Each structure stands twice: as structure tokens, then as C-alpha cells.
């Protein structure tokens, strides 16, 4: 069986730690005539070097992997999400972590089968996220942590199937109300290391939430976080450095009977809140 006949059966490919531009330069050199290389070697090399070493392309043939379900292109020197990905209409999982992406515009929006997108450690801004990107019915996991988001991506507000959302280590100041109105299937939410001042009361609608991480948002001192008490399935709650005091400590925390992991470190709590003594399932407590 030839390699060409095998391509349609490939389900996943990992192109991490490769450099798309370097690949293209090597391919171009292979196709230069020997005479041209000898007579005009300097000119040919200069033309090759002028090519952007990280223009967002992937090796030729990737778009022929018509049954591809997952693609990893982490640390691949990408500046844009390759348009070739738009031809992978069965793609479910895409990981483009640790590249140089500033936006997610392009053919990626046409991949209706996408279930998870990991794009952490890039330079993506809120304006670089198309409104249609997360409108697919099956989008379940989104990781845009460690980027340059100053505002919440409005595209996420309509992701009704979203179960995991990580927007930590950005510069987000406000969470839209509609996020918690529509995304009621959320099980994991990480908004830590941002500039949040409060969390919408509609958070109480996320009754399936298991893990909530809000740490390192010191401007939240005026937020009472009362909506947390409605999250009866919560197992992990991290509120480190969120301006917690005895006056704004979440009331009736003991009602979270499933809570196993609680982080209240780097706050102004002179004594252990009484509610903590009643958390019988608690296994890890950070003060």
C-alpha cells in the first residue's frame, strides 16, 4: 500500500516542535535546479530567506487527510491558523499552543466538527476571535489562557455545549452575563490571573460546575460571590488573592457538601471562617 493510499485513513497527526517556514524552505531548495544553485546560488538563497519563516502554512498534503480528527501544531512557529485546516471537515480537536498567533480568523471557522480548541500561550486579542468560531453545536473545550485578551470574547457567549473554559492569565475586566445564561453545561471554569472586579450573579445557573478557579483577581474585593452557593456540584474552588475578608466571605459555604479542594490563600482572613469546619468532604485547604 502506497503512502498516498494510506493518507485518507489517518486519524491524527502531531506536527509540534516543527517550523512550517523551515519546512517550506527545505522543500524549495530540493526543487531548485543544480545549475541555478551553482550559478546564482546567492540570489536563490536570498529569495528563500526572504520567505516568511513562520507564515502559518503546514506541510503539503495535510489537507488530503480527509478523515483527520485531531491535529497538534504546538510550538510550530505559526503566525496564523493555516487555511489548509478548513479542508479538514472531520477535525474535532485542534491544538496550536505556544505559537505567535494574534488572531483566529480564516478557514478555521468553517470546521463545523470542532469540539476542542487549545490556543494557549499566544498573543491573541479579543478582536482576533471571529464571532462565528464557537457557534458549532459540539464545541466543548476552549483554552485561550496566556494570551492578550482585554475583553471577553463575545463569540463564546453562544457556545451552549461548552464544558471546559480556560481564559486564565489574560487581562479581562468583565464577564458578560450571557455566558452563564447560555453555557449552563460548564464543568470547569478558570478565570484566574485577570483583572476581574465581579462575577455575574447568573453564575448560579451553571449547576453542573465542578471546578471554579478565580484566583489572582485582587480587584474582586467588592464582590460577595453569593452565586457560588448555588453550585452544589462544586468540588474545587480557588479564591486565592481575591480580596476575601470576613465581611465578604461567601456565606453558607458549608452548603457545598462536595467541596474537596479550597484555596483561600493570600487573602485578609485573620481567623478560619466557621463554615470551613463543616465541610466534611474537604481534603485540601490553603490559607
Image (tube, rainbow, N blue to C red):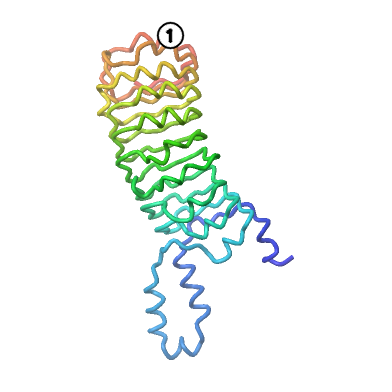
Which of 156 and 91 lies nearest the eye of the viewer?
156
Say which quadrant the N terminus sits in: bottom right
Q: Give how far across and how far down residue 155 sits, in percent.
A: 41, 41
Which of 210 and 287 lies nearest the eye of the viewer?
210
Q: Give how far across and how far down residue 36 sits, in percent.
A: 46, 88
Q: How many marks?
A: 1
* Label 1 SS: helix
Q: In the rendered image of this protein, does residue 9 appear above or below residue 40?
A: above
**Residue in the image at 41% along x and 21% along y:** 262
Q: Give how far across and how far down residue 202 sits, in percent.
A: 39, 23
Which of 87 and 150 lies nearest the eye of the viewer?
87
Q: Give how far across and how far down residue 101 sits, in percent.
A: 39, 54
**Residue in the image at 57% along x and 61% along y:** 62
Q: Is residue 21 left or right of residue 62?
A: left
Q: In the rendered image of this protein, does residue 148 appear above or below residue 248?
A: below
**Residue in the image at 54% along x and 46% along y:** 114
Other residues around mark 1 within 10 Å, as few (<14) / some (14–19) / many (≥20): few
Q: Is residue 154 left or right of residue 6?
A: left
Q: Circle 1 is placed at which residue position?
A: 278
Query: Which image quarter: residue 169?
Result: top left
Amino acid at each position: 500500500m502506497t503512502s498516498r493510499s494510506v493518507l485518507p485513513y489517518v486519524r491524527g497527526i502531531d506536527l509540534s516542535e516543527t517550523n512550517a517556514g523551515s519546512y517550506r524552505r527545505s522543500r524549495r531548495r530540493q526543487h531548485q535546479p543544480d545549475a541555478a544553485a551553482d550559478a546564482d546560488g546567492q540570489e536563490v538563497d536570498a529569495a528563500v530567506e526572504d520567505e516568511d519563516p513562520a507564515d502559518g502554512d503546514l506541510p503539503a498534503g495535510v489537507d488530503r487527510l480527509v478523515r483527520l480528527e485531531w491535529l497538534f501544531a504546538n510550538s510550530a512557529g505559526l503566525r496564523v491558523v493555516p487555511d489548509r485546516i478548513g479542508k479538514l471537515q472531520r477535525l474535532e480537536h485542534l491544538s496550536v499552543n505556544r505559537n505567535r498567533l494574534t488572531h483566529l480568523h480564516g478557514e478555521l471557522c468553517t470546521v463545523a466538527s470542532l469540539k476542542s480548541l487549545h490556543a494557549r500561550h499566544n498573543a491573541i486579542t479579543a478582536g482576533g476571535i471571529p464571532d462565528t468560531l464557537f457557534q458549532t453545536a459540539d464545541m466543548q473545550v476552549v483554552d485561550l489562557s496566556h494570551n492578550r485578551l482585554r475583553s471577553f470574547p463575545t463569540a463564546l457567549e453562544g457556545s451552549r455545549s461548552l464544558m471546559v473554559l480556560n481564559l486564565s492569565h489574560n487581562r479581562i475586566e468583565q464577564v458578560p452575563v450571557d455566558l452563564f445564561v447560555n453555557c449552563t453545561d460548564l464543568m470547569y471554569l478558570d478565570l484566574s490571573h485577570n483583572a476581574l472586579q465581579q462575577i455575574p450573579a447568573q453564575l448560579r445557573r451553571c449547576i453542573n460546575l465542578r471546578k471554579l478557579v478565580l484566583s489572582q483577581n485582587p480587584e474582586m474585593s467588592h464582590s460577595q460571590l453569593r452565586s457560588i452557593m448555588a453550585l452544589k456540584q462544586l468540588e474545587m474552588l480557588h479564591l486565592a488573592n481575591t480580596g476575601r475578608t470576613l465581611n465578604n466571605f461567601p456565606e453558607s459555604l458549608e452548603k457545598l457538601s462536595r467541596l474537596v479542594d479550597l484555596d483561600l490563600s493570600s487573602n485578609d482572613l485573620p481567623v478560619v471562617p466557621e463554615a470551613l469546619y463543616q465541610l466534611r468532604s474537604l481534603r485540601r485547604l490553603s490559607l
